[in-house]
Structures are given as C-alpha cells and as structure tokens.
C-alpha cells in the first residue's frame, strides 16, 4: 500500500485530523494574541519593560516544546488532554507577538509621535491612529511567526495522546506503517508552509504602499538579543 | 498522573544517575554533530549568497522551508528511507541549523566595511587571505551569535528525536509520558533547558576569548 491508497481510504480521518489541528492552533493563537498584544502595545507605547519584551523570544527559544507539553500534562490539574497542549501552544506563541509588537511600536519615529501629541491627540488616539498603522507590518510579521510556530508545534499534541495531524505520524512510527507516517508528514508540512505563505500574503496586501518604499531583501541576521527577531523556531 | 504520588521522586532520580550521564552525553553529541555539520554546509552557501546576489533568495527560501517543517513531520518523511537511525535524526537536526547559520554568516561577512577589504587587497593580500585574515575575524561576533542560537535551538529539538528511539534527555520525557510518571518527564525537560542555557553561556565565553577586540571596542565606545 502506498500513500495514495492510504489517503484515498482515509479521507474522512484526514479531514477530521486537519480540523482538530486547526482547532488546537486557532484557539491557541487566539489566546496568545489576547494575552500578549494589549500588553505589548501598552509597553511599546509607554516604553516600559523593554527587557522582558525583547528577551522573551530568547527565553522561548530555550524551552523544549515537547518538554513543555509534557510538563503541562504531568501537572495534577491538567493531564492527557487538549487543555495541556493548548496551554503549551499559547506559551510558545506569545514571545514572537510580544517582541515584534513591542519593537514595532518603539520603532515608530518619536518625532511623529511628538507631532501627534502637539496636535492635541490623546494617548489612545496616538496609539490607535499613529503608532498602530505604522507598526502594522512588524506586528503582523510577529503574528505570522507565532501562528506558524503554533501550527508546527500542534503536531506534538499527538505524542501526549491528543488529536491533530501528528496522530498519523505518531501512530505510523509506532507500528512502522510507512504510508501512514508519510501521509501525516506531507499534511503537516503542507499546513505549516500554507500558514506561512497565506499570512505572508495577508501581510503584503495590508501593508500601506508608503511603508514598503525602499525596502530591500530581508538580510536581518538572527542575532540574539536583537530587535524584531521574527524567525520561527523549529519544532 | 497517579494521585498520592509525590510531585518529584528524588530517590528515583538518585537511582538513575547512570542513565542521566549517558543520555546527557548523547544529547550533547547529537547537538555537536548537528551544529558542526551545519557549519560545514552553511559556510560555502553563505559565501555563495554574499558573492552572487542572485542566489540569495533561492538559498534562504529553501533553508526557510526546511526550517518551517516540524521535526516530527521530517521523521515521517525520512524514516521510510533511513529508518530509526541516528542518520534520520541528524538529517532533521542539521536542516534546522542551516537557515540560522547561513543568514548569520552572510550577515557577518557583508557587514565588513568595503574599505577594510580594499586596504587588504592594496597590501597584496590574495582573495583567500582577505577571507581568512580580514573578513572572517571581523564577522566572527555575528557568526558566533548564529552558532549560539543554532545550538540552543538544536538542544531543544534533540528531545524530539527520542520519538524515533535515539538516546538523549528526550527519552526521560517519552518514558514519563508512556508510564504516566511525572519525575522523569520533568527531569528530561529541566535538564534540557539547563543544558541549553549552559551551552549558550559557554559559547558566549568562547566568543569573548576568540574575539576579545569586540568587547574592548564596545567598552571604549561606551
């Protein structure tokens, strides 16, 4: 039996696992955004907490994803269920959003902000009408990084008896069923790359023309600690 | 987890020190091979993309796609061909170091001021001498920063290779999951974080020893 046979006889399961994967990722991204975005915008606007905002990405990098999921599973209050996985995914999804949103807001030209203040805009209006639009692309890049991170890590849910597309790989590995593990691998790889590409396009479409002028190839080195380190951490 | 069981069974840890030492050593070895081989592959590629502009996007995009694919999926692709072996684990681990290393080596090299390179050429340095004696030493801090990120990332990823049966700290995590036993699970996760932090600090020390001028210059500037 090859991959094509396996897929054609497991359509329903593939669909269901994809939905589970999207559900785990979607819920986690929602909570990661809810927890980190308001905090990052406030820190960025006031210029407080630079150390935490910038270094959270580096701390996040040292956390082993599998270990983190496993620790949540082992805590007395959670156990082998989706909540443990979602908590780990939220935690791993926060740093890219926090770092990028903070850096994006801080990088807005201070003269522009002062000019807005001089024109009588309230602090809320400055954030809403000046800083947010100018920082938009950098913030969205952080959200994209976070989303890809979460979709990729959700694969590990299967290791702790959860659902999602990782199920095919974990089950395939345990019984050495090659078509099954290949199916899972292709589906997971496709979903992560698709997330990256789709959000990349969304970013490009929503970026105002004035902000893209003179932007060349992305040559930012992945130096730690650095501003706007928007690279996904492999899982 | 079993109710009534203490949060951590310290006696279990004390009676498994042999396992800890072996798995810690294997964890380090897997990391070392991955970052070492990653450097050997990345260096020529980074040279290429800094010398031939056209190659920048295809090389970094390809490395970027490899980087995005979760390791568990990579095992799913590789196991049918290379089996449950160290080779399978290393192919995945190495492929994750490439993007970080290529980007940082390239950034380090292209940050070297053109004036400095021209002076070296004017003094009669051959292209190879310019690379080894001028460009590389000046690019070293940025390259080392990349090596540090790659190492920390790899140490976290090695734990996942326990799922294809490789010996490393990740085995404590999989043992813990399979036996519903908290102690090894937390031991594996904590040791892996400690190892990552220790490796990062060690490499920072190495960087200061082999490139002391960088720190001196920064202190002078401050």
Image (cartoon, coloured by chain):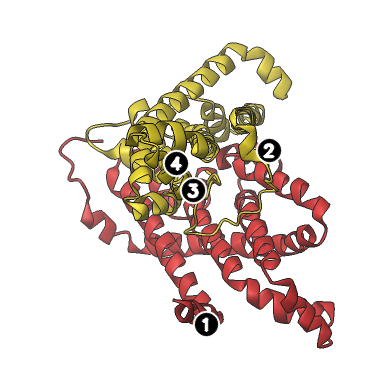
Chain colours: A yellow, B red
Residue B75 percent location from the top left of the image: 61, 41
The residue nearer to you, when weighing A26 against B219, is B219
For marks 4 and 3, the one nearer the N-term is 4
One can see residue A54 in this view: yes
Residue at 61 percent across and 15 percent down: it is: A10
The residue nearer to you, when weighing A41 against B73, is A41
Report which quarter residue A159 is drawn in: top left
Residue A100 percent location from the top left of the image: 47, 44
Q: Report whether B44 appears left or right of A73.
A: right
The correct choice, above or below, for A82 with respect to A95 in the image is above
The correct choice, above or below, for A157 with respect to B64 in the image is above
In the picture of the structure, the residue carrying the numbered disc 2 is B80
The correct choice, above or below, for A22 with respect to B205 in the image is above
Residue at 74 percent across and 76 percent down: it is: B115
Q: Report whether A77 appears left or right of A85.
A: left
Q: CA distance from mark 3 to mark 1?
A: 35 Å
Residue B98 percent location from the top left of the image: 65, 54
Q: Quadrant of the C terminus of chain B?
A: bottom left
> From the viewer's perspective, is the residue at label 4 or at label 1 nearer?
4
Q: Tally the marks.
A: 4
Q: CA distance from mark 4 to mark 1?
A: 34 Å
> From the viewer's perspective, is the residue at label 4 or at label 2 nearer?
4
In the picture of the structure, the residue carrying the numbered disc 3 is A109
In the picture of the structure, the residue carrying the numbered disc 4 is A101
> From the viewer's perspective, is the residue at label 4 or at label 3 nearer?
3
Q: Residues within 10 Å of mark 2 (few under 14, many from 20)?
A: some
SS class of the residue under badge 4? helix
Q: Are marks 2 and 1 in contact (CB under 8 Å)?
A: no
The residue nearer to you, when weighing A131 against A94, is A131
Residue at 26 percent across and 61 percent down: it is: B14
In the picture of the structure, the residue carrying the numbered disc 1 is B212
């Amino acid at each position: 039996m090859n991959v094509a046979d396996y897929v054609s006889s497991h359509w329903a399961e593939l669909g269901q696992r994809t939905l589970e994967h999207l559900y785990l990722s979607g819920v986690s991204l929602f909570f990661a955004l809810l927890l980190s975005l308001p905090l990052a915008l406030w820190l960025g606007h006031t210029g407080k907490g630079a150390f935490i905002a910038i270094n959270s990405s580096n701390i996040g990098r040292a956390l082993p994803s599998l270990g983190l999921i496993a620790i949540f599973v082992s805590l007395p209050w959670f156990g082998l269920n989706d909540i443990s996985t979602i908590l780990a995914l939220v935690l791993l999804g926060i740093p890219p959003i926090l770092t990028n949103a903070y850096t994006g807001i801080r990088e807005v030209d201070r003269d522009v902000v002062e000019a807005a203040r001089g024109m009588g805009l309230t602090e809320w209006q400055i954030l809403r009408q000046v800083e947010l639009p100018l920082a938009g692309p950098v913030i969205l890049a952080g959200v994209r990084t976070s989303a890809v991170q979460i979709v990729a890590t959700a694969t590990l849910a299967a290791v702790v008896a959860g659902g999602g597309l990782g199920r095919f790989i974990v089950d395939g590995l345990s019984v050495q069923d090659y078509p099954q593990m290949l199916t899972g691998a292709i589906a997971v790889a496709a979903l992560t790359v698709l997330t990256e590409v789709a959000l990349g396009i969304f970013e490009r479409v929503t970026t105002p023309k004035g902000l893209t002028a003179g932007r060349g190839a992305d040559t930012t080195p992945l130096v730690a600690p650095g501003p706007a380190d928007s690279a996904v951490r492999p899982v | 987890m079993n109710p009534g069981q203490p949060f951590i069974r310290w006696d279990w840890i004390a009676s498994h020190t042999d396992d800890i030492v072996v798995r810690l050593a294997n964890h380090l070895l897997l990391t070392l091979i991955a970052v070492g081989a990653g450097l050997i592959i990345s260096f020529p590629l980074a040279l290429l993309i800094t010398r031939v502009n056209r190659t920048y996007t295809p090389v970094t995009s390809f490395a970027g796609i490899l980087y995005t694919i979760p390791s568990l999926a990579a095992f799913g692709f590789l196991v049918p061909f290379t089996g449950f072996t160290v080779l399978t684990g290393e192919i995945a681990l190495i492929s994750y170091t490439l993007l970080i290393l290529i980007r940082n080596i390239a950034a380090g090299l292209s940050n070297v001021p053109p004036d400095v390179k021209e002076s070296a050429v004017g003094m009669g340095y051959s292209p190879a001498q310019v690379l080894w004696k001028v460009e590389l030493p000046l690019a070293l801090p940025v390259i080392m920063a990349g090596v540090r990120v790659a190492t920390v990332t790899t140490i976290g990823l090695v734990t996942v290779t326990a799922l294809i049966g490789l010996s490393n700290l990740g085995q404590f995590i999989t043992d813990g999951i399979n036996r519903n036993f908290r102690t090894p699970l937390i031991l594996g996760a904590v040791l892996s974080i400690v190892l990552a932090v220790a490796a990062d600090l060690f490499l920072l020390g190495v960087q200061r020893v082999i490139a002391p001028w960088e720190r001196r210059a920064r202190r002078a500037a401050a």
